[in-house]
Image: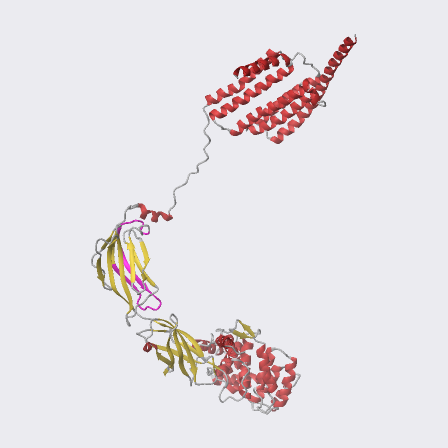
Amino acid sequence: AWTPGWSVFCLVLLTVALGAQALTPSHHLSLSDVDRLKGLLSQPFTDLASAYYSIVGLSKLGASVADENDACQFLKAQLDPMSVDSLFFAAEASQAIADCEVSIFNETRDILLAAVSEDSTVTQIFRAVSALSSLGLPLASQEVVAALVARIAKEDNVLAITTALQTATRLSQQAELGGILEEIEDLAARLDDLGGVYLQFEEGLEATALFVTAAYTLSDHADTEPPLKEDQVIQLVNSVFSKKSWDSRSEAFSVACAAAALSSNRFHVPVIVSTQGPATVSHSQPILHLLVTDILSNPLASANLLVESAQAVASKSVVLSQAPFSLRNGIFELNFMASQPASGYYQFTVAVTGDSRLVANQVELKVKVSTEVAVTNMDLSVVDKDQSIGTKTSRVDYPFKAKGSFTADSHQNFAMNFQLVDANTGVELTPHQTFVRFHNQKTGQEVVFVAEPDSKNLYKFELDTAERKSEFDSMSGTYVLHLIVGDATLENPILWNVADVVLKFLDEEAPAAIQSKTLYMPKPDIQHLFREPEKKPPTVVSNTFTALVLSPFLLLLILWFKLGANISNFSLSPSSVLFHVGHACMLGLMYVYWTHLNMFQTLKYLAIIGSLTFLAGNRMLAQKAVKRYGQSSTLTFFTRSTCEN
Amino acid sequence: MSNSVISVISRFLEEYTTKTSNKLKVVDAYLFYILLTGALQFLYCLLVGTFPFNSFLAGFISCVGAFILGVCLRIQINPDNKGDFLTISQERAFADFLLAHTVLHLVVINFIG
């Protein structure tokens, strides 16, 4: 079902599709580029091939070699009548020079006709056919077509097929060129699309340029429109003419041929619309100048330029529609200021008409309308914060400075009101940059604020002295006040010294100015503060407590003495001596550990001493145990024996 | 109330001086010494401050450890407890005491700084 939604969708899709196709050439040959190309081709030539490129190339550009007679003599002298290539170069070049005839022999025709066969390369066939045609010798077109078709099947590369196309342009129009014409489309399919902007063969610029030349020359010859879409033509133009300095004569020749083919064929002529100078109009220069040329920067003979629509970028309103340009001295002119546009940017859509061959004839341009600004109704006042005292307003006219200075302290605000209008139309403007600058001449301080318009496009600026003191570093003094107005569409940016303002701040910091000056000087050294050791108690206290802590040992000895502990049972057996010595050593090792050793060394020594002590101790204790059991067993025996009794 | 406390204490002291063997009293004296040393160290810490804290800890833990080991020794060599320690002779108890003390001293000296 055909709903309204569907139709809208289709319309949108169509618009998008059409919009996507509006491609215009981004490269072409300007007049200086054409001169450079001619310069490269005019370099002196040393052999027939370079002579051919130069002479024929220059003729395509509508120029000629410096000395034509000399060139003709050169061709005649260098000609080798036995070589097909030599005959080709000489014949073609002599055709381009007026009154230059290359002499031919009877054998020439035979040599050239012999080259036209299935066994020669396409290049050979092309050169033979071209030479035959330039020298005015008869040739059988159908045979050539057959040979070409056979060769295309064998040599299936871009250059070969292009050369075949070129060959076909020299044949009679009655011949069957349909098959060869189809090759144009097949070749076009082999082009590489780069970003939708360039279309070229991977073989390079020369191959692309030669293809363009061949396609259009053959199409003209066969009177059939080439199967290239408008977008493809523009992309080919971009590829061929993006390079502005050429490596070799043959490359320059190919570009010259392509340029000639694209500017004067019967089907597609790409048109270039460019501005003369910057695209700006103003009251002093109300006329927009546009140039309409072909890709060789030659003005188009029959073209009409029309503004389809001029739309303001900011407001999207259409200012102009369907207005024609007038042609004067080859330049198209339009008085845009007659439509009284407001200042700003405008998107122009222009169309070139008058020739059905024109390609890319709808161009989008951005035009700037600039104007002059005037500052009006500039009122300066000092307002008391609590509004109790009436404001004192003075009006200042541009470009004069206010007579007295204005003083504002922390209880007051300094205010500035003004309007910015278009000097020519009186319309209110809101430029991009409206700054209020305070400059302290003594300290070099500069503070900049932005003045903003209110809803009625009246600019207001208010300085709250107390609130803004940090930006001024609380430096009281006289500040010179400037108003700065600027915008891309203004021809007269304004820097206006409006008045002097004396600001008084509380808490003045005199070193503030010095601070900013010393910002980049070396700072004072920072001394590293090591961690301070903790406070220790006085030595007297420590010593007292040491004595106190050791005193219980004395008490222990006294207690033991009182209890009657003694070492009378000390047996002087070697194991017990060794044990006690070893044990003493272990205790000594503890002290040494505290003072000198680390854990690993201590453990090492401890292992040695410890094992000795253990063995000795074990033996000693065993002996003691035996003695003790012996005693107790005798006692038991004695008791039992007495009991039995 | 205080009367009964005093009578309990005096009874305990009487029993202690008469019933406990000399060997155990020797060990008890040693334990008392350790206790005093530990208490004095703690007093110093309270009065003067904890600097150096690691040394205080080492000393105090040494006293505590030694006290515990002494108590273990006393328990093990008390003939009244023989039934609980059938496999451990007095010599063995003493040997254990010495070994444990070696380890304690190693740790304490390491920590004393």
Q: Is residue A2 visible?
A: yes
Where does the image place residue B55, in percent across and percent down from the top left? 53, 27
Depth check: A344 or A533 in front?
Answer: A344
Based on the displayed image, in which of its 4 quarters is residue A589 positioned? top right
Instruction: Look at the image and give the residue range highlighted in magenta.
Output: A471-498
- Where is A344 relative to A327, above or below? above
Percent coordinates x, y for residue A17 in the rendering? 50, 76
Apparent side of residue A492 relative to residue A192 in the rendered image (left or right): left
Tell me the colour scheme of the image: secondary structure
Q: Is residue A477 magenta?
A: yes
User: On the rendered image, what quadrant is the N terminus of chain A found in?
Assistant: bottom right
Question: On screen, B41 above or below A84?
Answer: above
Residue A507 vs A615, above or below: the answer is below
Asked if the stretch drawn in magenta spans residue A441, the answer is no
Q: Which residue, as the protein is rendered here, is positioned at the far front?
A: B1
Residue A543's x, y, as percent? 49, 21
